[in-house]
Amino acid sequence: MFSGFMTNTWAVASIVAVVAGVVGLFVVLRGAAFVADALPTGAFAGAAGASLIGVNTLVGLGAFALLGALGIGWLGRRGRHDVAVALALVAMLGLGALFLSFSTEYGPQIEALLFGEVLGVSATEIAPVAGLGAVCVAAVVVLYRPLLLSSVMPELGEARGVREQRIEMCFLVVLALTTAMALPVVGALLIFSLMIGPPAAARSVTSRPLLAMALSVVLALVTVWAAIAASYVSNWPVGFFVGTIGAACYAAGRGWTVLRSRRLRRSQASTLPPVAPTASAMA
Amino acid sequence: MMTNPRVSQEDMLSVDGVSVRLGGREVLHDVGFTIGPGEFVGLIGSNGAGKTTLLRVILGLLNPSAGTVRVGAAGVGYVPQKIQLDPDLPLRARDLVGLGLDGNRLGIGLPSRSRRQRVDEMLRAVDAGHLASARVGLLSGGEQQRILIAHALISRPGLLLLDEPLANLDIVSEQEVVALLARIAREQRIAVLISAHDMNPLLPVMDRIVYMAGGRAASGPTGEVVTTEVLSRLYGRHVDVIQVHGRVLVVAGRDDDLGIPLARPASAAEIRTA
Amino acid sequence: MGRLLSLIVEPGFFTNAPVHVALLAGGVVAVVSGVVGTFTVMRGQSYAGHALADVSVTGGSASVLIGISPLWGFAATSVAAAGVMDMIGIRRPRGRDLATGIVRGAGLGLAALFLYWDTTHSATGATVTILFGSMFTIDPSLLGVIAAFSLAAVGIVAVLYRPLLLSSASPDLAVVRGVRVRTAGVLCLVAIALAVSLSALTIGAILSTALLIGPAATALRLTGRPGLVVAWSALIGLAVTWLGVLLAYDSYYWPPAGHGWPVSFFVVTLILLAYLLALARRGGSRAAPLERGEPRGAQPGCG
C-alpha cells in the first residue's frame, strides 16, 4: 500500500484533505453546500474535454471549474438563483457526457472521474496540486476575517457593497480550485462530502473558529486516509468510502450536539430562562 | 360586560381566560374579551406585549395552555403581517383572491362566471380593480396588502383579523388604510380586529380597545381603558396617559416611581372594565 | 417540403422502432416533468428535486445489480427519500441543505459501490445508463409502468392544485383556509420523486433535474397565470425532448461517424437555451422594485 506509485496518491490526497478541511469550513458556514456541489460538475466536463484533446486533466478541470464559478456568480444575479445554478450545473454535465461519448473509454473513465480513482494519480500531478493547494490556503488566510464576518451576517444580496461581492467571487474561485485539486482523487460526485462532512462535525464540536478549522483538517485527513486504505484493500471505489465516512462524521457531529444540549438542559434548574444559542459564527 | 342592546347577542369572537406558555415563559396571562358583530376593535400594545401570539391563538395556529376561544359561525378572515410574496409566483391578484374562496378544495376547479364576478367585486371593494391581472409578487407592499384584504374578505367571514397592517407606513398611507378598513367594515357589516403598536391612527374609528402589556390585557371603550389608573394597574407600575391635541401618549412614570413596582400586577378581574 | 424534411430528419427516423418508444416514453415523461416541475420551482424546492434525483442513482445502480430495470430502483429510493426528507424537515435552509448534501453523498457513495460490483460481474455499461439515460434502449414492456407512474404524479398535483397554489403563496394563509399544509407538502414531494425517477430513465438521473425545473422556470418567465404556466411548461418539455431525440438520431451521421451524440446532451442544452431566451426576453422584469427585500433563494449556495 505504501509502495512507489501509491506514495503519489497519499501525497496528493493529504494535500487535498488539508485544503478541503480549510475551505470546507467556510462552505459550511456560508451555507454554500449547493455551490460546492455544482462546481465539481462543471469540472467534470472540463476533465472529460481535456482528456479528449490530450491536455493535462488538471488544466481542463481547473479551467472549467473556474468558468463554472464565474458563470454561477453571473447567472445567480440574473434570473432566479437556485434555478440558474441547477441549470448551469446540469448543462455542464451534459457537455461532459458529450465529451466522454467521443472518447473510446466511455464507461471506466466516467466512473473514475465521478467516483474517484486511487491509482489514477501520477507523480507529475503532485507539484501543480501542491501549488494550487498553497494558493487556496493562502487565499483563505488572507480573507479570513471578511469571510468569517460575512458568514455571520445575513446575506443581503443586491444590497451588499462591491467589496462583499468581490469577496464572494474570490471564495467561489477558491472553491473552484479546491474542486479541481480534489476531483482526480475523490471524484466529482463526492468532493462535497469531503468539504461538508468533516467541517460540519468540527463545527458541532467547537465554537472557536481556528479550533474548528484545525479539527476540520484533521477529520478530513482521517477520512481521506481511511478511504484510500480501504479502497486499496478492497478495490471498491474511493468515493464510496468518502461518502460513507463523510456522512458518519456529520452524524457524529449532530449526535454530539444533541447530547450536549440534553446535558445542558438537565443541569439547569427549571426556573432559569432557556439558554440563548451562542451568537457566534458557529450558530 | 354590558351588551349594546342594538346589536344581536351572538358574538363574533369570544376569548376567555386564555394563557399561553412558550419556552418556559408565560407569554399571555388570563386574556379575555368579546367582539360583537360589526365592532371595530383595536388590539394595541408594543412589540413583545403578546399581540401576535394572541392572534395566532385566535386563528387556531397555536394552542393555549389555558382558556378557550370561540369564533362566530361565519368564520375569521386573516391578513398576516409581513407577507413577502415571491416575485416569481405565478398568481395574479384575481387568482390569489379566488383562492380565498376555495383554496382548500381539492381538484383544479371549473371556471365559473359567478366566481369571477365575486372576485372582481371584491377587488373593486378594496380599490384594486385595476390590479386584477397583475402578478401579485410584483405589486407594491400597499397593493399586496389590499389584495390580501380582499382574499380574506371574499369568503364573507364575520370577523376580519389584521396583524399590524399599519406598520412601516407613512402617515398618509396609514390614514388611507384605516379609512378603507372602516368603510369595508361598515359596508360588509364585518367585525374588525386590528393589532397595532400605536393607537392614534385608529382612534377615530375604534369602537373598543384591547390594550396589552406584558401578556395581560384590558378591554373596553377607549376612553375607559386608556387612563392612567387602568394602564398603571395593567403595567404593574406607574404610567401616565397624556392627551395632546387629540393624540394619546402613554409614558413611563415619574422619576421617584421608577423601580418601585406594585406588589403584584393586577388580576384580570380587576383590570377588565365595562 | 419533402426535401426540407429530409434535410432535418435523417433517413429511417419515422420507421425506427426504438425511436417510436423514445418519442412516446420521452414525451410522456417530459409532460409529467413539466407539470410537476412547475410546483417544484414555485415552492422553491429545486434543490430537493436535485437531491431526489441523485439519491435515485443509488436505487438505479442497486436494481441493475439485481437485474431489474433501473426504473424500479429510481422510484423506490426517491419516493423513500421524499418521505425521509419530510420527516427530517430541518427548519433552517442552511441546515437542510447540509443534511441533504450529506445524504446525497452517502447515497452516491453507495451507488459507486453498486456500480463497481456490477462492472466486475457483468460487462454492461450500467453507469452510463443510470447516469445519462437510456432513451433509445427503453424496454417497451415498461411503457405500462411509465404510464402508471405518470398518471400518479400528475394526479397528485391535479388533485392538490388549489391547496398547493395557496400554500406556495403563504403557508399561513393556507392553514387559516383549512389546508393540511404538511400533508400537501409530502404528497407534492412524492410527485416530484416519481417525476424525477421517470426522467432518470430517459435522460439519466444526474440530468433529470433539467427536465424538472428548466421548462417550468422558463414558463414562469413567460406568463403569470397558473394554468398557462403549467401548460407552457409541459409544452416546452415535450418540444425539447422530441427535438433532442431527433437531433440524437441525426447525430449518428455527424462526426465521429457511427457513434451518435447522447440524447441527454441535446435535451439539456436545449433546455438551457430555452431558459436563456426567456431570460433575455423578460430582461426588464427583474428590475421591478425590490422594497420588499431580497427574493427568496437569491444567496449563493442556497438551494
Image (spheres, grey):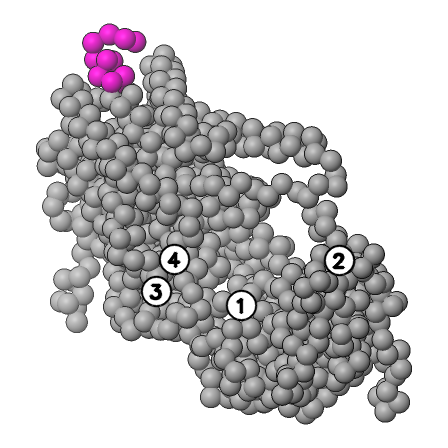
Secondary element type, mark 2:
loop
Q: Chain of mark 3?
A: C
* Position of residue C153 in the picture relative to residue B237 (left or right): left
Residue at image mark 1: B83
Give the alpha-carbon distance from disc 4 to disc 3, as whole Å: 26 Å
Q: Residues within 10 Å of mark 1 (few under 14, many from 20)?
A: some
Question: Residue beneath label 4, please?
Answer: A156
Residue drawn at (83%, 78%) of the image: B11
Q: What subunit carries mark 1? A: B
| Circle 4 or circle 1, nearest the eye | 4
Q: Residue furthest front?
A: B256
Same chain? Circles 4 and 2: no
Q: CA gap, disc 4 to disc 1?
A: 18 Å
| Neighbourhood count class around disc 3 (C-alpha, 10 Å): few under 14, some 14–19, many 20 upward | many
Across and down, in percent, residue B170 comes to 50, 80
- Determine if residue C246 is in view: yes
**Residue corresponding to mark 3:** C218
- Give yes or no for contact between labels 4 and 1 (Cβ–Cβ under 8 Å): no
Res. B260 mark: 2
Circle 4 or circle 2, nearest the eye: 2
Q: Which residues are magenta?
A: A1-11
Q: Are marks 2 and 3 in contact (CB under 8 Å)?
A: no
Label 2 vs label 3, nearer the camera = 2
Quarter location, residue B152: bottom right
Apparent side of residue A261 relative to residue A283 in the rendered image (left or right): right
